[in-house]
Amino acid sequence: MVRKKIGDRVPRRRLWFSILAAVALCGAAVGGLVGYRALSDSDDPDRAVTVDEASRLAASRLTLYQASPVAVALTAAEGGGVTIRVEAVVDYRTRRAVGGYQVTGAAGQLDRGLIVWDGAGLGLAPVPAGVDGPAWQQAEHIPRQGWSSRAYTADPLDSGLRLLIQLGADRPDNPLLLAQSGARWLGHDRIQDRRYDRFSGPRAQDATDGKLSPLTYWVDGDGTLRRATMRMPGLGTPTTVEIAGRDDKARMPEAPWIAG
């Protein structure tokens, strides 16, 4: 039963692209390696990935998994001038995440609180009074019954949370299948004085419209994922995920997931 929803005054929008088929970097790879060919090594923007680039993109999920727990920030535009910002910690070994959220609009802050999520859905709770510290510590002070839980919807926030929780994996993807799935190299960018390759993600196996994937990834020379964005139908601003790296102090709380 849904008891509360972040930004529940904002109308929902349906995704034109299945989130489950898109969020994993391996995507829906076409079967077989017979059609694999040497990939272009040119520096032209928007081209097929090279073998090295496909290998780094494929390794980025394992690199993220090994760095757990990692500090992340998600920004989602819900339309109507409403923006949701989530700052959190994700543990890819347990596929659980916890953080704080803030909803802002034209008039300023509309709502704030704590948020937890995993592969099945998310939970919301108010910030506990008199409890300082990061969100993962505050969440431990809220009993299981204090969380308002619900399944995912197709809203930009939920799609971003699902993307985030599935980015890391305990093994790399197959770079050849990844390349066959339509991953593209889009260019170079610098983020905090470090160079990253910008990639368009794999596409669904049956995609025939010729358009790029709605997912874009920024990966450095070591296979470290720094940023991911998801374009949403009808919204000019994509949902953005920023990955700040390992948070050695963070501990995933048990309270939100304890039964009873």
Image (cartoon, grey):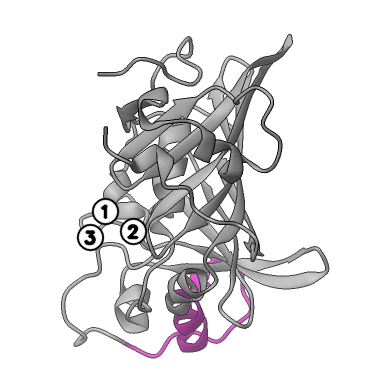
Q: Does 108 sit left or right of 207 as displayed?
A: right
Q: Residue 98: where, in percent of width, then height?
A: 51, 44
167 vs 251, nearest the viewer: 251
The reply to whether dot 1 and dot 3 touch (C-beta < 8 Å) is yes
Front-lying residue, 228 or 131:
131
Q: Which residues are magenta?
A: 37-57
Q: Residue at x 52, y 66 (%)?
A: 68
Q: Work out whether 165 lies above or below 63.
A: above
- Residue 87 visible in the displayed image: no
Residue at 43% across, 85% down: 39
Q: Is 56 contained in the magenta span? A: yes
Residue 245, horizontal then vertical, whole percent: 64, 64
Q: CA distance from mark 2 to mark 1?
A: 7 Å
Instruction: Quadrant for the N terminus, please.
Output: top left
Residue 144 placement (x, y as % from top left):
37, 32
* Residue type, mark 3 in image: Gln
What residue would you read off at disc 1? 207
Tell me the residue that label 2 is attached to.
Answer: 203
- Residues packed near mark 2 inside 10 Å, few (<14), some (14 to 19) or many (20 plus): many
Secondary structure category for the residue under label 3:
loop
